């Protein structure tokens, strides 16, 4: 996907991918795209989708040595989540990108639709309990480690990487 939500779109039928590919392949033949399954039942806060921006410092891939920063944040949509087909093209419902959300009439310029990770954790602990929240954060750390391991050989062999 491109930055600021450009190039991101949702489909609900496989035939739409083929139509899209035929239409756009002549315009941008050298670009790569990622297709992923939409999370059917996402965790919502206040009825709204959010994503996390987490920062990880990788000191070494062999052995893997990394540190996760405490200064990450959650980005929220301005509009409550819905699976209604009529709202499938409503990017204010589905994409958390600030470049998109700041165009919404409901955008809050004070906090920019963001919570820092410590505020998110505090909310989750109050809602789901301490143990469940700790497990959620442990699972996120595990995903980060598995993701780094998945690209470990590529990073080690890339002359542009340390």
Image (cartoon, rainbow, N blue to C red):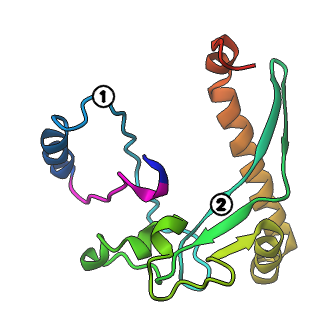
Relative depth, front residue between 27 and 44: 27
The residue at 81%/83% (across/down) is: 126
Secondary structure of the residue carrying numbered label 1: loop
x%, y% of residue 117? 78, 66
Identify the residue at image location x=52%, y=75%. 77
Reading the image, the residue beneath label 1 is 30
In terms of secondary structure, where does tag 2 sit?
strand
Q: Specify whether residue 6 is painted magenta.
A: yes
- Asked where in the image residue 137 lies, by quadrant, the reply is bottom right
Q: Position of residue 20 (x, y in %)?
A: 18, 47
Span colored in magenta:
4-13
Query: Counting other residues with Cα less than 10 Å from the Cα at mark 1, is it few (<14), some (14-19), or many (20 or more)?
Result: few
Q: Quadrant of residue 12?
A: bottom left
Residue 84 appears anywhere in the view: yes
Please, is residue 97 above or below residue 139 in the view? below
| Mark 2 or mark 1: whose residue is earlier in sequence | 1
Seen at 69% across and 28% down, the residue is 149
Q: Quadrant of the C terminus?
A: top right
Q: Residue at label 2?
A: 52
């Amino acid at each position: 996907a491109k930055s600021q939500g450009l190039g991101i779109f949702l489909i609900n039928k496989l035939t739409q991918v083929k139509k899209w590919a035929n239409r756009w392949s002549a315009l941008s033949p050298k670009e790569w795209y990622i297709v992923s399954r939409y999370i059917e039942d996402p965790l919502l806060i206040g009825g709204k989708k959010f994503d996390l921006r987490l920062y990880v410092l990788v000191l070494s891939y062999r052995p893997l040595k990394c540190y996760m920063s405490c200064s990450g944040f959650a980005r929220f949509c301005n509009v409550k989540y819905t699976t209604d087909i009529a709202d499938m093209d409503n990017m204010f419902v589905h994409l958390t990108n600030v470049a998109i959300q700041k165009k919404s009439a409901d955008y809050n310029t004070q906090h920019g639709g963001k919570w820092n990770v410590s505020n998110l954790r505090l909310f989750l602990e109050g809602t789901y309990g301490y143990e469940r929240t700790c497990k959620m954060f442990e699972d996120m750390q595990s995903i980060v480690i598995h993701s780094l391991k998945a690209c470990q050989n590529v990073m080690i062999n890339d002359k542009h990487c340390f």
